[in-house]
Amino acid sequence: MFNKVLVANRGAVAARVLRALNAMKIPAVAVYSEADAGAPYLEMASETYAIGPAPARESYLNQELIVDVLRKSKADGLHPGYGFLSENSAFAQKVIDAGSHFIGPSPKWIDAMGHKTRARDIAAQYGMPMSEGSAVLPDDNDAILAAARKIGFPVLVKPAGGGGGIGMLPAKDESELLGAVERSRSMASRGFGTAEVYLEKLIERPRHVEFQILGDTHGSAMHLFERDCSTQRRNQKVIEEAPGPLIPRDKAVAVADQIAGIMRSMGYDNIGTVEMLLGADGTFSFLEMNTRLQVEHGVTEEVTGVDLVRAQIRSAAGEKLADILPGKPEIKGHAIQARVYAEDPKNFFPSPGKLTVFRPPQGEGIRVDTGYAEGRDVTPHYDPMIAKVIVRGATREAAIDQLITALEAFEIQGLKNNIPAVINILRSEPFRAGRVHTGIISEVTGRKA
Amino acid sequence: MARIEVKSEITGTVWQLKAKPGDKVEAGDILIVIESMKMEIPVITEDGGTVKEILVKEKDPVAEGQVVAILEE
């Protein structure tokens, strides 16, 4: 096991990893930018280092500074959390080159899954369920039409080098196709420096269902079931739950087993999440893989009783999966998480400010993960998420009611936040019925999300 | 000639300037892009006119309600 671990992150995830390290009695090193000096979670670290000014580029994304702290502190493990440098393969390699361990998968997996089309190619090669798609489109209108007809309309035009939903355009029939290809190419070349686009079968009103993976460095990999994260705005998740509603258990487990088998064949060696789209016809298709701990890992922890962060750290230290998690995990009850964002609930604009009042709900079955405390400033420099409220109930209905009660009890003053908007969604008929899809916020609020 | 003040709706940092003095702009045009909490939020003019002044430069911090550009109708 590690002698000392550096947590190269901030906020809720830094707090979460520090909590795991304390429980494992591993001395912890924390870093902080000027904006995070005095943050409450820093008290859980045995050593802390200032790493520069508030802008992330000059602190949490500054690889040299962080590797420098790694050397100074003599930490033999580094936990990247999520965001910042967690999916940067060059950084992971620098950590390894400095003689330490990167608590995540091997850099080759971070690298392979970081490129959209390459990830798709690798996943397809191992038999991952995949929507039909084309190769990069040629400059020949007849060939483009033929490619679309082969897939079948509606299709989605996607930039090959892209991400974040930029330049993705649907074409419902032939009359829309060439115009969509032209606009997507133009957006792709401006946004990603390459005009390469390709076609995928368009999945209408899809659900975002993802599978939690845990692998070890001895060739073993397993799943910890699925999470539904369909409730999103601006391509960012707002509500996440486990298990996924209205998915027959045998179907969910069969897909999870299949994905875990693929991860074993690939040799995937740490924590990861395979994101899939679930179509209305019940078919799953590969979206992407995240090679890190996920923001919503807590809902899986609550229904399985497995501490994913501790398991991830033990796997990175070279322990076998069979020792880390003996026996097959099972799902007990239903867990839901709401992400509390400092934002205007009407237009989703960020709303930084001082938390003059910040009193998270407490009680049986309620878990709040946060890096903030009353009196702290929420600055414009980082992600707007200020807390995750996670509840577990015996049933989905009970969990929804508990989450509404918990959110109503959450006292926040000093900035705008999305709690009223989340409560509206939780109370809405489509959400309660489990009829979730990635456009549910627009459906419920009537506003573009 | 009417003088129009264009304000930032959010607190953040100037990411990109999309307009410069002398530019003719229409209602709905993006003048400046502000980065806040990992999001890019455009400053959009509600009126058409000519850009008289851009009061910020890239990387400048801006506050909610701060006047960032002046237009002339």
Image: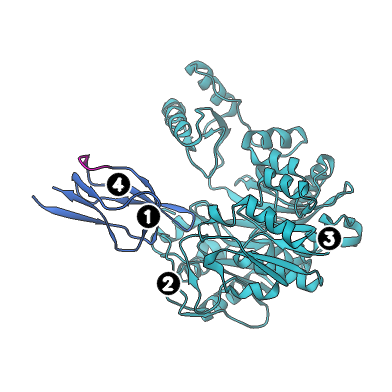
SS state under label 1 = loop
Mark 4 or mark 1, which is nearer to you?
A: 1
Between the residue at mark 4 and the residue at mark 1, the CA separation in whole angstroms equals: 15 Å
Mark 2 on the same chain as mark 4: no
Q: Which contiguous range is marked in magenta?
A: B20-24
Give the residue at x 81% y 72%: A25
Q: Amino acid at mark 4?
A: Leu
In magenta segment, residue B21: yes
Chain under numbered label 3: A
Same chain for the residues at labels 1 and 3, yes or no? no
Q: Quadrant of residue A178?
A: top left
The spot of residue A134 in percent (x, y) is: 60, 27
Drawn side of residue A134 relative to residue A291, left or right: left
Q: Which chain is blue?
A: B
For the N terminus of chain A, the quadrant is bottom right
When the figure is inspected, residue A339 is found, relative to residue B38, above or below; the finding is below
Q: Is residue A33 magenta?
A: no
The residue under label 2 is A415
Chain label for disc 2: A
Which residue is disc 4 drawn over? B31
Q: Which residue is mark 1?
A: B60
Query: Residue at 28% of width from left, 42% of height from top?
Result: B19
Identify the residue under disc 3: A314
The chain drawn in cyan is A
Same subunit: marks 4 and 3 = no
